[in-house]
Amino acid sequence: MQLANISSRTPHLVQALEALALQPSHELNAQSLLQELNGITVLVARKFTNEKTAEGMLDAYQLTIGCISLGISLAEIPDNNEAMLNFLLSHGAEYVFQMGFRRIKTLAELPPYTSICDLDLDPFEQQRNLKRIFVKFCRASPNDTWTGDSLYKQALTERQNNRDIIDCAKWIRQAHYAGAINEIDLDAHAVITIALIFGMAGKAPIVARFKQKDAENLIQGIREHQLDAEKGWLAWLTQIPTQHHPILLERMEQLRSTVLKKILAKSSVKQIVAEIQKHAGMEEDIDYP
């Protein structure tokens, strides 16, 4: 029953206004809120939609509703109309809108993927990304179901995980045995996979980028010396800051059923190198003839 209520609820701002309408003397508060909402809507239209068209003003109106609702939802107050109204009246609509918008900016600053390219640092692209996120999570119609806050929380968790993966890969790059790799472009999953594949050999130099010959030598060395990859990983982890261990342990689990399985199954060196290259992405150092 609770799930059904959540999935069919209207925006939090609408719920607060419904509580206001039930109060015997609400004219002054209603007029004050209306003025604030009008002002916010105009500002949103000027910055994100178009204040000169009816369509632009409607879009801004819906973004205002959603952003204020996001601010209310994430304020950790009781989930009832009266509490939402009290919070809105005590802080003011503009302040609550700013609370919601700060959450949107926080999300926009987190990586949507586990890869980075120089375009991600372009100010124009960053502004476009902010607008996309603002529209995606804050567009809300007063009469329709709104789930922007739950979608926001889900996206925040995913992007925070992406950030942790990227931070782990950046650390590995800085510790690369042949010298730090400082390129902007980064495929974080590939860097972590490469490091773990070479980490099977145990407490050895940390590898963030490799040549095909390096992979061949690694496989032959593991087989020749009958190295235990699981023990090798445990020894290798002692060189890595503990905050990165959860990311690495999760990736190890995935590699057990791919690269490690092929090594233990005595697949040909050529097959295993091909498997490694499949996971390495752009982080492999290609030797051109």
Image: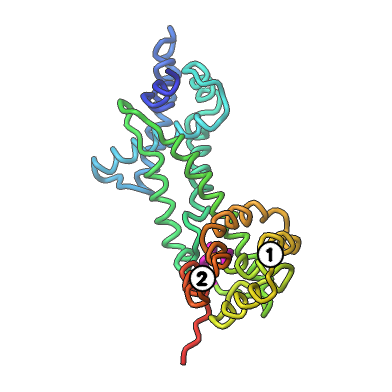
Residue wearing tag 2: 267
Residue 160 location, x and y as percent?
56, 49
Instruction: Give the amino acid type for the residue marked by disc 2 in the picture.
Output: Ser
x 51%, y 61%: residue: 258
Work out which quarter of the rendered image holds the N terminus and state it. top left
Q: Please, is residue 237 above or below residue 98 in the view?
A: below
Q: Is residue 261 left or right of residue 230?
A: left
Specify whether residue 77 is in view: yes
Please, what is the dominant secondary structure of the magenta stretch? helix
x 66%, y 70%: residue: 174
Which residue ends up furthest to the top in the rendered image?
A: 24
Q: Which span is picked out in magenta?
A: 184-193
Instruction: Give the amino acid type for the residue marked by disc 1 in the picture.
Output: Asp
Q: Is residue 59 left or right of residue 271?
A: left
Q: Secondary structure beneath disc 2?
A: loop
Residue wearing tag 1: 228
